[in-house]
């Protein structure tokens, strides 16, 4: 009886190196690594040793005969990945691309941020060099979105925080919290006191919606909702008011939209044993959200959510799920089994016209509607204090929905950090493969970037690992001592001690 990888998988690839028969794929060397929603165990080769389950930081690996009824689909999904693939458990040639510790001239490395990308980068620095690492974190507590983004009911995924905790207590690590780089201290000051600076500040703004009139009604940011229910120190306990909210429209259908839809429609008692902020739990107990419409401008074949997150909503029988939109039901039914929206095959369909109808009376049950092919065009406030969303469907019809709350979950975007070149188009720190670059393409010495600040706001926790390790390879390559007399070795500098304020 093989093991199977399930919903929590964040693609960090920790299980790969411990599998004695190399039956977990795709590996980082294989083309679909980074595009599949999770990794998969080949049930034909798994020898049931359990090593991968022990190595997984988020408890995503389970013996197939211990899967719950809701998890059974993962046995099929793991097997399905290998259906048309030959057994391939040959190991690739070992690679040792890195210099030995003695060659590297890195004494002090600064890491700005403490989210997953920062943690993976620092881990790689500590493992591959003798350098000391100083984290600078704007908030009073470390963790980034692993703490203040990952949904409070995703307890398995939130265990990644425990996985990183020993890092902050490592003897060669100092953590400076409450230091907003660019405000309390500058990148220049930090660089002057370190051999290398690794920027891992994430992306903490909303992507702009070009059709929203800056003078008119604005959608409520899902970022604020997320910060509110995760207890983000910068989001007030009363930042979200759900009193009288019956219908919520969520713009965008990425995983953040699905997190919001799931939390807003959950039975509050099912959230008691999660890590939800107490003020959010109290507010949800007094709320009566009847319907969440998850609005996507494209069809089910272009869903931005991942299959496991969609599956989780469909498997939650107490909150029925519907689809709406031109051809959406037929399109979902025609998707391959592994497609993101495949769990929506066979769920009941609604007419788009139904989206405009008043929601049932208070206490009449909850539902989630996945509306596809509905492109929002405008928002206005109504006389009753609600919001009217107008949209155009892909069949040319007009759609009007009156809602009590319109949430924007259309993606995150980075903000400029003073002293660092910013790529306005991508919303990232300007860089070439992790080396920070100026507008003219020249490299800013000893300055690097990882995670969402490097790639843009895309990818799960584990996707930041290979990316951070690649940047650390660049840090190390730039710090290798060359033989005396070759003329290209870096000159060792005496580093000043950096004065930093501490708020926490
Ligand atoms: C709502 C939400 C839920 C998610 N849930 C999941 C999930 O269930 N599973 C999954 O695999 N992935 C999930 N993700 C994706 C995952 O969180 C990201 O891939 C990951 O957090 C990106 O890591 P990062 O380190 O680049 O950024 P972040 O995690 O955002 O970390 C950036 C850090 O830098 C700090 N910082 C920012 N600016 C400064 C400054 N000027 N000075 C000092 N510090 C600064 C921030 O406070 C923060 O701690 C989720 C994302 C979101 C938005
Ligand atoms: N459980 C998890 O693993 C988890 C949880 C949360 C987040 N994450 C990850 O974090 C990353 C960010 O997630 P996200 O949900 O914030 O963003 P996302 O996946 O990029 O989704 C953004 C959504 O907004 C839509 N959108 C963008 N611009 C729009 C516009 N102008 N008008 C209307 N709709 C618009 C997009 O539609 P188009 O597709 O048509 O552009 C898409 O549906 C993703 O990689 C996600 O997987 C993971
Ligand atoms: S149980 Fe053992 S053999 Fe099977 S996938 Fe996990 S590590 Fe590999
Ligand atoms: S989270 Fe990491 S260790 Fe766990 S199954 Fe996914 S890739 Fe493997």
Image (spheres, grey):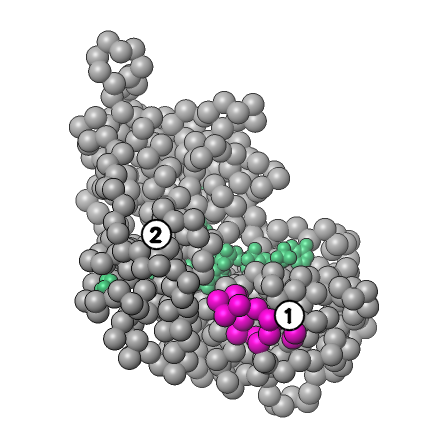
Instruction: Give the x, y percent position of residue 204.
Output: 52, 50
Evaluate if marks 2 and 1 touch, with contact meaning CB atoms under 8 Å apart: no
Lateral position of residue 177 relative to residue 421, left or right:
left
Q: On residue 331, which mark appears?
A: 1
Image spot of residue 83 (x, y percent): 40, 66
Is residue 397 shown above or below 460?
below
Q: Position of residue 384 (x, y in %)?
A: 78, 75
Question: Which disc, if any, is residue 106?
Answer: none
First in residue order: circle 2 vs circle 1: 2
Q: Is residue 105 left or right of residue 343?
A: left
Among the 4 quarters of the image, the one containing residue 15: bottom left
Q: Is residue 234 left or right of residue 41?
A: right
State whether residue 249 is above or below residue 470: below
Magenta-drawn segment:
329-345
Specify whether tag 2 is near ligand 4 (CB below 8 Å).
Answer: no
Q: Residue at x 57, y 83 (%)?
A: 320
**Circle 1 residues within 10 Å: few <14, some 14–19, many ≥20:** some
- Compared to 100, does 323 lie above or below? below
Q: Nearer the viewer, residue 307 or 360?
A: 307
Secondary structure state at the residue bearing disc 2: loop
Residue in view at x 57 percent, y 36 percent: 423
Q: Is residue 192 visible?
A: yes
- The residue wearing badge 2 is 27
In three-dimensional space, the C-alpha distance between marks 2 and 1, rounded to whole angstroms, equals 31 Å
Occupied quadrant, residue 197: top left
* Observer able to see residue 409: no
Task: Name the one closer to the observer, 475 or 29.
Answer: 29
Confirm if mark 1 falls within 8 A of ligand 2: no
Q: Residue at x 17, y 28 (%)?
A: 102
Other residues around mark 2 within 10 Å, as few (<14) / some (14–19) / many (≥20): some
Image quarter where the N terminus lies is bottom left
Whether 334 is among the magenta residues is yes
């Amino acid at each position: 009886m093989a093991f199977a990888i399930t919903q929590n998988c964040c693609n960090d690839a920790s299980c790969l190196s411990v599998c004695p028969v190399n039956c977990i794929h795709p590996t980082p060397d294989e083309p679909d690594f980074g595009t599949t929603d999770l990794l998969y165990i080949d049930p034909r080769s798994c020898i049931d040793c359990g090593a991968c389950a022990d190595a997984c930081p988020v408890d995503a690996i389970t013996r197939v005969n211990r899967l719950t009824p809701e998890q059974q689909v993962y046995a099929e999904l793991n097997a399905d990945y290998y259906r048309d693939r030959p057994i391939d458990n040959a190991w690739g040639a070992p690679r040792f691309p890195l210099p030995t510790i003695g060659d590297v001239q890195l004494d002090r490395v600064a890491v700005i941020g403490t989210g997953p990308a920062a943690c993976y980068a620092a881990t790689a620095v500590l493992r591959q060099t003798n350098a000391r690492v100083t984290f600078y974190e704007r908030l009073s507590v470390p963790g980034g979105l692993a703490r203040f983004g990952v949904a409070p009911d995703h307890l398995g995924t939130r265990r990644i925080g425990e996985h990183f905790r020993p890092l902050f207590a490592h003897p060669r690590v100092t953590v400076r919290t409450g230091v907003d780089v660019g405000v309390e201290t500058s990148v220049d000051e930090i660089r002057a006191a370190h051999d290398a600076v690794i920027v891992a500040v994430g992306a903490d703004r909303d992507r702009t919606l070009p059709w929203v009139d800056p003078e008119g009604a604005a959608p409520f940011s899902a970022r604020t909702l997320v910060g509110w229910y995760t207890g983000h120190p910068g989001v007030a306990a009363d930042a979200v008011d759900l009193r009288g909210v019956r219908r919520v429209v969520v713009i965008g259908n990425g995983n953040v939209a699905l997190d919001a839809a799931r939390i807003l429609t959950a039975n509050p008692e099912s959230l008691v044993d999660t890590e939800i902020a107490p003020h959010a739990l109290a507010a949800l107990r007094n709320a009566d959200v009847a319907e969440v419409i998850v609005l996507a401008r494209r069809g089910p074949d272009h869903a931005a959510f991942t299959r496991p997150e969609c599956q989780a909503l469909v498997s939650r029988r107490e909150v029925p799920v519907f689809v709406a939109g031109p051809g959406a039901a037929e399109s979902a039914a025609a998707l391959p089994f592994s497609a993101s929206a495949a769990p929506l095959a066979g769920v009941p369909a609604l007419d788009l016209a139904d989206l405009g109808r008043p929601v049932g009376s208070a206490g009449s049950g909850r539902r989630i509607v996945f509306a596809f092919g509905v492109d929002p065009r405008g928002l206005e406030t109504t006389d009753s204090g609600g919001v009217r969303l107008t949209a155009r469907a892909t069949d040319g019809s007009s759609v009007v929905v009156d809602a009590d709350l319109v949430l924007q979950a259309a993606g995150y975007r980075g903000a400029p950090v003073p002293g660092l070149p910013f790529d306005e188009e991508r919303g990232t720190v300007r860089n070439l493969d992790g080396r920070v670059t100026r507008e003219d393409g020249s490299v800013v010495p000893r300055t690097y970037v990882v995670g969402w600040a490097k790639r843009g706001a895309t990818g799960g926790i584990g996707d930041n690992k290979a990316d951070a390790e690649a940047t650390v390879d660049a840090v190390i390559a730039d710090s290798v001592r060359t033989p005396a007399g070759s003329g290209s070795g870096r000159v060792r500098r005496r580093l000043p001690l950096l004065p930093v304020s501490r708020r926490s």
